[in-house]
Image: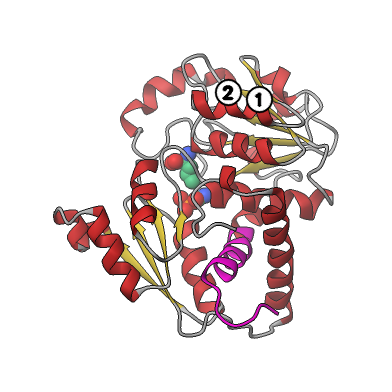
């Protein structure tokens, strides 16, 4: 693994496998009530520029369970918010902390921070990517389906940070990815082109949601307006109306297709209640697994005592 966890595209297949294996072991330890504290004495800083429920909770609880502590650092309350440079902040924080998790707008901001930090930096969501979410979702798929190899994941909705991270994962791992996005709301062009060129099982973009969902093993969606796009919500509700994941659309999926959503959901917009709460939905497992998978990422990157 590299020093930082900024994009799934930076991971090799063996890195994914190591994280999945450690996640399973850490989840089992938690289930068995085994105290396992390889990060005792370590501190994680968490810089938040956007709201969060799952990401904050899973990093904070995860760090505590691994024996360390996590500090919530809102940009408003640190000198960064008053103009201290990213580089100076990164250099200073590297002298106190053992790792930093950042949730912000620009991916470049996180990369700039990481380039100036001597400690591991983890991307907790940017406008472009959400790697912690998708690696954790792959772990949920493995739990439910026993594998990800050879499966087809259908993503319906906005070509946002979640879609882009799915493409990065498909570029590295042998599963097929079918996206359905309205025109003008495609994933990042460079990430998409690279994904199409490099994915062993293919990355495909459709306009018609039913074409993406046909026979799929996983049906995934996310909000139509992401954090920072609230002003576009009404306009998007009209543009995306045919991209709702409802029982009519899921009927095109495979018989036991998993219904996935990173949450938070806008119920009645991108997904209906009956589908989100239905028997094929694994959204609460997805939320739980953020904890176990991020513990694995922190254990590997921040180190500490020998992994057991
Ligand atoms: N899925 C996710 O990242 O949730 P939060 O925004 O609540 O952290
Ligand atoms: N695409 C969403 C994901 C939230 C976890 C957003 O960026 O707001």
- Give the residue at mark 2: 193
Residue 218 place in picture, x, y as percent: 74, 37
* Circles 2 and 1: CB atoms closer than 8 Å: yes
Q: Residues within 10 Å of mark 2 (few under 14, many from 20)?
A: few
Residue 143 place in picture, x, y as percent: 78, 55
Identify whether 131 is placed above or below 255. below
Color scheme of the displayed model: secondary structure
Q: Residue at x 71, y 53 (%)?
A: 140
Identify whether 27 is placed above or below 84. below
Please state which of residues 39 and 249 is positioned toward the viewer in this rendering: 39
C-alpha distance separating marks 2 and 1? 6 Å
Looking at the rendered structure, the secondary structure element under dot 1 is: helix
Q: Is mark 1 within 8 Å of ligand 2?
A: no
Looking at the rendered structure, the secondary structure element under dot 2 is: helix
Residue 50 place in picture, x, y as percent: 35, 49
Q: Is residue 283 visible?
A: no
Q: Residue at x 38, y 28 (%)?
A: 233
Left or right of 121: which side holds 300? right
Q: Is residue 214 magenta?
A: no
Left or right of 280: which side holds 57? left
Identify whether 305 is placed above or below 207. below
Q: Residue at x 70, y 22 (%)?
A: 212
Dominant SS in magenta = helix
Q: Residues within 10 Å of mark 1 (few under 14, many from 20)?
A: few
**Boundaries of the magenta span:** 289-308
User: Within the image, what quadrant is residue 29 found in?
Assistant: bottom right
- Give the residue at mark 1: 197
Identify whether 25 is placed above or below 286. below
Q: Residue at x 42, y 66 (%)?
A: 119
């Amino acid at each position: 693994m590299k020093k930082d966890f900024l994009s799934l595209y930076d991971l090799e297949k063996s890195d994914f496998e190591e994280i999945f294996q450690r996640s399973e072991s850490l989840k089992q330890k938690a289930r068995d009530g085994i105290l396992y504290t390889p990060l005792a004495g370590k501190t994680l800083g968490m810089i938040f520029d956007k709201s969060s429920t799952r990401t904050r909770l899973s990093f904070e609880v995860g760090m505590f369970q691994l024996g360390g502590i996590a500090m919530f650092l809102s940009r408003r309350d640190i000198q960064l918010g008053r103009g201290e440079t990213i580089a100076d902040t990164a250099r200073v924080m590297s002298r106190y902390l053992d790792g930093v998790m950042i949730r912000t707008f620009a991916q470049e901001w996180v990369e700039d921070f990481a380039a100036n930090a001597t400690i591991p930096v983890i991307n907790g969501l940017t406008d472009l990517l959400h790697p912690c979410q998708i690696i954790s979702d792959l772990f949920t798929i493995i739990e439910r389906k026993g594998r990800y190899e050879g499966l087809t994941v259908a993503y319906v909705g906005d070509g946002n940070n979640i879609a882009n991270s799915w493409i990065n994962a498909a570029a590295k791992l042998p599963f097929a990815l079918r996206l359905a996005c309205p025109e003008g709301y495609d994933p990042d062009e460079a990430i998409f082109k690279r994904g199409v060129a490099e994915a062993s099982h293919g990355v495909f973009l459709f306009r018609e949601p039913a074409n993406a969902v046909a026979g799929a093993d996983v049906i995934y969606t996310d909000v139509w307006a992401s954090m920072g796009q609230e002003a576009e919500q009404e306009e998007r509700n009209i543009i995306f109306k045919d991209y709702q994941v409802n029982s009519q659309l899921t009927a095109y999926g495979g018989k036991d297709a998993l219904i996935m959503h990173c949450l938070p959901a806008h119920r009645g917009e991108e997904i209906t209640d009956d589908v989100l709460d239905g028997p094929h939905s694994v959204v609460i497992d997805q939320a739980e697994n953020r904890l176990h998978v991020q513990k694995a990422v922190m254990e590997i990157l921040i180190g500490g005592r020998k992994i057991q």
